[in-house]
Amino acid sequence: MLTEGKIGVYETICIVLIAVTAKLFFIDPGQLAKLAGPAGWLVQLVAVPITLVSFLFIFLLMKRFPGQDLVSVFETVFGKIAGSIISIIIAATVVFISVLFTREFSEAIKAYVYPTTPLSMIIIFFLIPVLILTYLGFETIARIFSSFVYLYLIGIISILILSVPLYKYYNLFPLFDGGIGHLAIVGLTRCSVYGDILFLAVLINSLQGIDHFKKGGLTAILFSGMFIFAVLLSLSLTFPKAVFTELTIPMLALTRSIEFGTFFHRFESIYVFLWSISAILAVGINLYIFTSIYCKVFRITDQKPLVLPLGVIIFSLNILLPSSTGIVCLLKLFRNHSCLIYFGMPILALLVAAVRGVKGIKTGA
Amino acid sequence: MAEEKKQGFFAKLCSIFAYRPPEHDTFVLPETGDEESCRTAPEKIEKSDLEYYLDQEDLKKAAAEKEKNEKEDKDNVKDDVEVGEEKEIKNQTRASLFRRAKSLKKPGKERQNAAGDKKSESDQGAKEETGISPDINISRDLIKEELNIPTSVDVVVRDFKLNGKVDAFIVFIDGMADRDVINNFILRQLMNRILYDKYDGGSIFEYIKENVLSVNQVTDLTDYDSAVTQALFGLTILFIDGCKKCLAIETSGFEKRGIEKPTTEAVIRGSQESFTENLKTSMIQIRRIIKNKNLINEFLTIGSADRSGASIMYIRGITNPSLVKEVKRRLKSIRTDFAMGDGAIEQFIEDNPWGIMPQVINTERPDQVASHLMQGRVAILSESAPFALVVPVTLASMLSSPEDYYLRWQFGTFLRLVRIFALLIAILLPALYISLVNFHQEMIPTELLVSIASSREAVPFPSIIEILLMEGAFELIREAGLRVPGIIGTTLGIIGALILGQAAVAANIVSPILIIIVAVTALGNFAIPSYSLAFVARLIRFGFIALGATLGFFGMSAGLVIAGALGASAKSFGVPFFAPFWPRTKDSGRFLIRYPVWELERRADEVNALNKIRQPKISRGWVKGEPPSGEKE
Amino acid sequence: MRSSLIKKIILVLLIVVILPIGATGCYDRWEPDDLAYVLVMGFDKGVTDKLRLTLQIASFRDQGEGGSQKKGGGQASATESVTVECPSLFTGINIANITTSRRISLMHSKYVVFSEEMARSGDFEKYVIDLPRFREFRKSTHIVISRGKASDFIAQNKTFLSMRPAKAFSLILSQQVRDSFLPRGRFFDLYNGLKSDIEEPVAILGGVNPLKLKQPGGGEHQESVSGGEYVAGEVPRQGGVKRDFFGAAVFRGPKMVGALDGEETRVLGMVTGDLQRGFFTIKDPENPDYIVALDVRPARRTQIKVNVKGDRPVVDLTVRLEGEILAVQSGICYEEKEKKAVLERAFEQEIEERMDSLVDECQNEFRSDIFGFGRRAVTHFLYEKEWDNYNWPEKFPTAQVNTDVDFIIRRTGMIFK
């Protein structure tokens, strides 16, 4: 099997936090604003509990099969072939989301700083570090995540604090926009954003035991929930609804508006570091998860030979995608419905296991 | 080669990227067990431990080897990777001495024949038990041949008779051995008949050792190989007719440089001595600082032709024994003819020669080595270089200078932060500049931007060429400053930089602001305490310039992730390079903050020392005690 | 083995060497001297085409010689301007590129000037709403409405006291806020006002001042009481540059409907909280021949309560100010407790009157909620539909506004009688 090394709760939280919240920096908040107006932050109050409940189901599933990762759980529950197919479906989703994320990032950065640079060049420069991360393996990824999280937090919190003078509380009103029921439905689909929590179930053997899994997962969901809540709230506070909904990249617009004294303004370029590193890391962990599932399904012991072909595939898929408006449609689809796969499959597995009475073998004490 | 020729260019290109599985397992530094138990009963390392360790390795390899080739000779398991032919050559070199010893015994004609059928003998040679011949003539001939007498003029073989009866000779190298000792305490004693009065006909060898020689250190040797080696190290070897052993008498004493001030790692406060090229002096310098019985000093020879010595130092009871074993294993496995001092050894033992990060600390300060030893690291001293190697290395230890610990912790912390800043400046500043002026002009204040633009008006090159020109010029100044003799060297650096910069600006080749950038970068580079780390910064700076010039901040971020990933995956003797920052340990703050000395209760966690406690929670006992009641006036 | 090692090294070297050299012709790389930095943009209605675009560009000419002093006041050309006729801003930039021989960059623009003619017509919206789509344009740029032509305004937009136009232009509008004869006229304030229905935008009013003071005895003139009752272009001053900023342009939706003079702008600032500090002059309440000067700051944030329950919205406006006595010409001892109260009441009354008349003007003449009462009104609504049905822009002119000004003299300056 793959040697993946061990990580602690802290690294777990870092990985999930960045993988989940990196989506905020691009078109996601704008899309949410189109659905929920200035109440995007309230939507999280629905999405986070739903995610927590889904995670609880995943936890129950993993607890039922101690010592097994998600792929082998699927194989035990559904049988070898069906289980493998389900794992592959998840892996394919992961790859597709990585492709979309790559393209989303490239389009965003192209629109903002590099209008004439060819897209393929940006994608290549984006993919090289991503593939190196995937090549070097999980331990390195975990370390980079756990150290970058400091810069990440400093960056985000600095944005939130520096934009305080721009906050206007009346921008939040009308509070419930299209009605509470509507917000609840949006919240139900928005839990897809937190779908990356499933990665922990794939990597469960790297976590030290099921307790770490539970503790890390719950804390990570709550943390990223708080984070998304805070960022969306500050965006809603800064922009009136009519402006918020028309922004392509709201976080960029926020940093561009920051002005602090006569010297501290026009420094949004510095956040290019934040945007790009977090996007690289988020795609990196997604691709690693893909290789991990792939290796586990096909019993491959080393993910390294997969990396280069994977890179070529991601690159070609990116080039195949049409204009940025098409990307937005696909992203909407995946950001709002990937929970069906990410949460639906494990819950399905749990149901089947409960009905068929399949249980894992208890290993040791 | 023939195969490769058939491949097209594209296939060749692909073969560069093609994945190859690693050739060896990576060493992982094992965690040490419960601290308390470690403290009470530190693991005892015996000589046999090492052999056991090596045997285990061999057995493992042998097991793997068996599947492939069952007929493989067990003795040659270590050399498993080499092709058959190479293996034989090695066996020959190993066995050559014994063989020659044998052939010397034979009459002249047979000796020549022996050379002819070397091959047939080679297999026997290894297994044959050979010692020193009791016949002194054979020994003398052999030694003379081995040491190339009389071609080599500085090797002296002196024949004499013990007690006027027994034939004996000593061999030493003139200049390496101390003449006074040989004259006064070896020859005079050996030839003094009065001393043989009490000889009762037992072993003359033992008698001489016990009663005649008045030299502090003598060793028995049983084979010619080590006799020759010892002679080369400056010892005097005594051969006695009829004895199957010879005696190595410590007489080494040669001209050496005195202890001087450190030149590359100068500090203001703290010890002002540095190592010299003499291994023994260096060892003594460390021992003078750590007067601990558990400071172990093991000696190895590296290099088949130059036989340069290396010494491994560690503290038993603190250092992780696996680390010591691994260091020894790596050192012993080096097969080379000429190991040029510590630099070459460093390259032979480092984990990943492709990684750009340094994997060994290189220092000329005994106090630095001592403090590393006390942290549980292993030092390797080598002959002929005034530097010591310390493993394992982390970024934190490369950024800390002994000065940190001589100063109060507030100052030490400040210095450390300055150095981290310097490292960042040295790596990133030119790239930041090029990204700013070429891609992110909106970040520059308008007034400054307009003045940069107007100062660049007359410059015909793009900024990237400008910056490469200036960086190139500075690298030249630096290299030239090293080579130019004496004081001129240092002044050349400053004057050269000033004049060159001024002239380049005046000639409209570069813009003035760029001179500032390049100069600050150079300053940042000089502020890095470790020479090898500074070199890393010098090199990857160009990578970042390239990325910054290609895609601005985005390119730089990609570079940062790559550099971070490579650094995070780098390991030095099983210790991650970025420890204690990544992976996190209890005292990760140590990277940024130099804790007060009374707070340093634990040794560096990443070294996995046996005894992790340096001092009790309350190290300043007086805090709890009563101050003495002052005298009343 | 050996050959692949060499290959690897060569590959790494090639990448490191080729990248920067290849990058010299790289797509989005611009040397700072290949760009022309627009400091001020001006929009006028075109004659031959839709738009007449004026670009004021920082010149590199005088910057290099740093200390060289040129005499002759406004003659120094630290900036140069280009005017082109074009269908849109972006084509205009392309056309102007030919003149400048450098690529024109808007990323350092300090403010945008629209002519009043354009602002009053529907054209204004067309150009404004597309500005934030362009990546080089920043929303923190100031918006100036020029009485008269924008190109004339820019022609008089020169530096005073220094040769650094960038600094001068960025300071003038950000520092003016302190004296508060100008509104906070950022682009995003204007844009948010245009886009949302909770407030209406205002912009900075600019104009060209003839720089001629009236001769003594030259006809009738009304004596100014507070000192700020002018609009840009009419401020009585001489010397300096002709470009004038004073007062505010009031919008109703995307159209300019009127102008506020400096004094009204200050009162507006009291309501919106933009007023940081200002020197006010009122008639001495005890002796109307003399004046009293006060240094006034907001004591607390202005309280606005909007009641939307009834048919007409009811707005309760409480402005709390504090201040310092600067000058008492009559020598009356306003430091005394009773007298102090008299002065305070007088000032309160004065401000209340001005505020009432401003509210009246906005409700009836402009029909524009520039105070942002709608911001408070909206907090009473939880659902979007309810708010849309309420139709604030229609309700605002009918609102009953109760103003209450509270003023306390905290200090008496350097003299205490």
Image (cartoon, coloured by chain):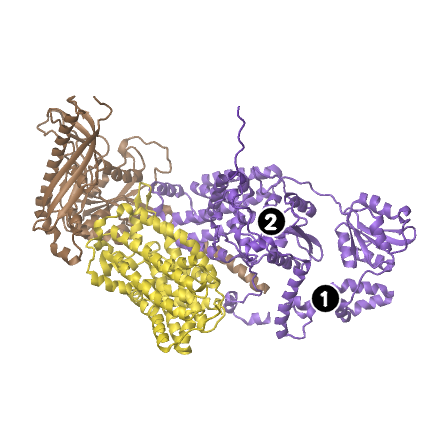
* Front in this rendered view, residue B133 or B507: B133
Picture residue at 34% right of the left edge, 37% below the top: C62
Count the marks.
2
Q: Residues within 10 Å of mark 2 (few under 14, many from 20)?
A: many
From the viewer's perspective, is B236 left or right of A256? right
Cα–Cα span, label 1 and label 2 = 38 Å
Query: Dividing the picture into quarters, in which one does residue B53 lie?
Result: bottom right
- Using the image, determine if residue B323 lies above or below residue C289: below
Three-letter amino acid code at disc 2? Answer: Leu
* Front in this rendered view, residue B627 or A13: B627
Chain painted brown: C
Q: Residues within 10 Å of mark 1 (few under 14, many from 20)?
A: some
From the viewer's perspective, is B266 left or right of A306? right
Q: Secondary structure at mark 1?
A: helix
Q: Nearer the viewer, mark 1 or mark 2?
A: 2
Q: Position of residue A172 (x, y in %)?
A: 22, 53
Residue underneath mark 2: B373
Subunit of label 2: B
- Using the image, determine if residue C339 lies above or below residue C234: above
Can residue A194 be seen by looking at this rendering? yes
Chain B colour?
Answer: purple
Picture residue at 53% right of the left edge, 29% below the top: B630
Chain painted yellow: A
Picture residue at 29% right of the left edge, 62% below the top: A47
Q: Position of residue A27 (x, y in %)?
A: 30, 59
Residue underneath mark 1: B91
Q: Secondary structure at mark 2?
A: helix
Three-letter amino acid code at disc 1? Answer: Asn
